Image (cartoon, rainbow, N blue to C red):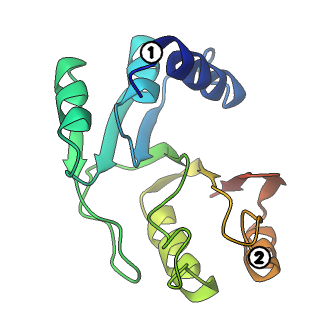
């Protein structure tokens, strides 16, 4: 994450793909915010941003502080709702998801994801959306067919590793 040019380019692309570089300003929650580069760009563009992440790597904490970004320290766990994050969000993002038991025997199934998505939706404005970005699992897939069906039932647009769910 210290390869600043690489990660800023990746996060600029995310901002553009989400249409955050034009239009109305939004309230954005980024779960697993890491160093905060995505939030930094969004705030520069006038958005109201909040990061949520665990506090294990000092570098992430220090980068968020250096960039002056708000971060809520919280660990995502199955069947545990998010903390009170104040007023609702227009967009909730989760890039490069690892909190779902990624590459372990305990990778989340549909029950865990259903609970999590229901909870996320309770933090969204009526016109809000959720953008999920997955990592490949041990079988080479981003998620299984059961999760694909769950996402589709919620009206999601699925593009390879990205899942966009309207509220």
Q: Is residue 132 above or below residue 143?
A: above
Q: Is residue 15 visible?
A: yes
Residue pictured at 55% horizontal, 46% vertical: 95
Q: Circle 2 sits in a helix, a strand or a loop, which is it?
A: loop
**Measured from the top left, where is residue 43 in percent x and y?**
39, 19
From this viewpoint, which residue is outermost toward the front?
A: 138
Locate the N terminus by quadrant.
top left
- For this rendering, which residue is in front, 113 or 49? 113
Residue pictured at 38% horizontal, 20% vertical: 40
Q: Which residue is mark 1?
A: 4
**Measured from the top left, where is residue 41 in percent x and y?**
45, 17
Residue 47 placement: quadrant: top left
Residue 80 placement: quadrant: bottom left
- For this rendering, which residue is in front, 127 or 141? 141
Q: Which residue is mark 2?
A: 144
* C-alpha distance separating marks 1 and 2: 33 Å
């Amino acid at each position: 994450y210290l390869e600043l040019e690489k990660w800023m380019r990746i996060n600029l692309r995310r901002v553009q793909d989400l249409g955050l570089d034009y239009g109305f300003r939004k309230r954005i929650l980024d779960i697993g915010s890491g160093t905060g580069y995505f939030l930094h760009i969004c705030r520069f563009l006038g958005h109201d941003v909040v990061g949520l992440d665990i506090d294990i790597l000092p570098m992430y904490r220090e980068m968020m502080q250096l960039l002056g970004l708000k971060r809520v320290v919280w660990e995502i766990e199955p069947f545990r709702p998010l903390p009170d994050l104040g007023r609702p969000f227009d967009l909730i993002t989760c890039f490069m998801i690892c909190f779902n038991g990624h590459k372990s025997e305990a990778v989340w199934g549909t029950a865990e994801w259903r609970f999590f998505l229901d909870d996320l939706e309770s933090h969204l404005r009526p016109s809000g959306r959720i953008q999920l970005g997955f990592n490949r699992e041990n079988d080479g897939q981003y998620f299984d067919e059961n999760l694909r069906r769950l996402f589709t039932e919620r009206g999601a647009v699925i593009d390879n590793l990205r899942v966009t769910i309207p509220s």
